[in-house]
Amino acid sequence: MLMNTSGIETIAAIATAPGEGAVSIVRVSGPGSLAIADRLFKGKAPLPSFRPGGSFVHGLLEGPAGVTDEVILLIYRAPHSYTREDAVEIQGHGGSAAAKRILRAVLDAGARLAEPGEFTKRAFLSGRIDLVQAEAVLDLIRARTDRAAQAALEQLNGRLSGAFNALYDKTLVACGDLESTLDFSEDELPATLMADVALKLKSIRAEFKRLLDSWDEGHVLREGASVAIAGRPNVGKSTLLNALLGKERAIVTPLAGTTRDTIEEQITIDGYLVRICDTAGLRDSSCLIEQDGIRRARELVLQSDLIIYVVDGSLPFSQEDRDHLARLQKHKTIIVINKSDISINETVKPLASDWSVRYISAARSEGLEDLKKGIIEHLGVREGIPHHAVISERHRHLLISAHKDIVEAGLILSRAEADPTLAASRLRMALETLGTVTGRIYHEELLNNIFSRFCIGK
């Protein structure tokens, strides 16, 4: 279906990254895009506006100051474009100056500079994609691993949207069933109707749980996992960081307190981005500089997705270690027994029954693969490239809100004197929230919040 183009401005922006390159692309979209191409493009007849969609032609781009660049012009006819509008792409020589010259000529010819994400916003408003797919475009651009890119593609292809739409439709049916009871008196209500609705709500809650459970993986895929290496001084924390990185990043000395500030680096484990941070050794210190480093270490440990607590396995397990571990959560902590190539003190061994424990020799890079496997297991993610879509923080927030209304509707129906009107009201609230996820229901503030994170030209 063609868009109503009345009142819609024609927009333009540079679509390629800044810097040197073989080709630069200026994207133009809107009802005036072909007329602008007619005014600027000099090449073989016919004019661009007389050419079919999907064609491209070589020629010169000539602005008010003369020839701007030698270009290739690509022509898109509505609705067969990214925005479902008439559009052109102008491919010129690479480099910032060449791209800016082309863009300036296009703006002088009547286009307006696009806002961040405005092309994708128009794709959403035209019905080409929904909000979940629009967010996937940004996820794909920002993906730093194959896993993240694959998950973004699954979302862009509609797999996550399909799950949300199915959830919306099931909730809509349950709500419709309840609202249909409003036309009956109590003695006329079908005997099994309330029980049937209750069963549907149970199935809907299970689907909510499945989607919410994917957030941990989605968080790690999109943002990377934060992993803090903590422990007392001189237990091998910096040596472990260097071993995981495969390079000498942190200074290692026999002196306690060598690391006084956090050192953060990124590694990829099984396709997941991991931001791993070495911290100052935890101890009492009279040095003000070291005290500040220890304070930062404690704060980072609390904020991290996972803590690797390093213990010197050749020494007796200390009361200090016990005190530090008492402040940590077992489900997000791996105890690493270092120097296992020397010997393991008997007082350390009982830890294995209570905590997740890995034995390594950081100096010899032994046991690192087992540790990496443990990191992936604790992050709650799966092995291999994902063939499923995972929710984002925005989706999670809205799902939690909608789920509360679903649960409340079920509780209302479970009472001795069930009130279908009140339960249906709760389900309508859940539907409104679910509609906001995919953009069935939206407001300008929501769109601005999502698309302002995009780069100009996308």
Image: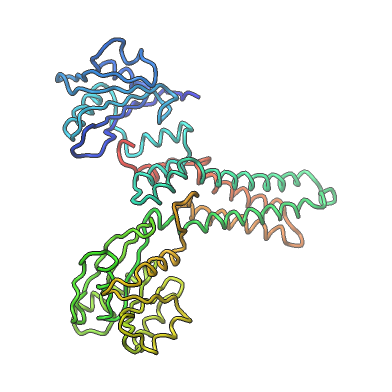
* Image point (35%, 57%), residue name: 273
* Image point (39%, 89%), residue name: 347
Residue 1 in picture, x, y percent from top left: 50, 24
Residue 455 in picture, x, y percent from top left: 31, 41
> Please, is residue 383 above or below residue 251 in the view?
above
Residue 242 in picture, x, y percent from top left: 25, 68
* Image point (18%, 78%), residue name: 253
- Viewer can see residue 296: no
Front residue of 261/59: it is 59
- Viewer can see residue 313: yes
- Looking at the image, the residue that sits furthest to the top is 45
Residue 300 in picture, x, y percent from top left: 32, 70
Q: Quadrant of the C terminus?
A: top left
- Looking at the image, the residue that sits furthest to the right is 187
> Please, is residue 57 above or below residue 378 in the view?
above
Front residue of 302/191: it is 302
* Image point (46%, 60%), residue name: 381
Query: Residue 435's quadrant in the figure?
Result: top right
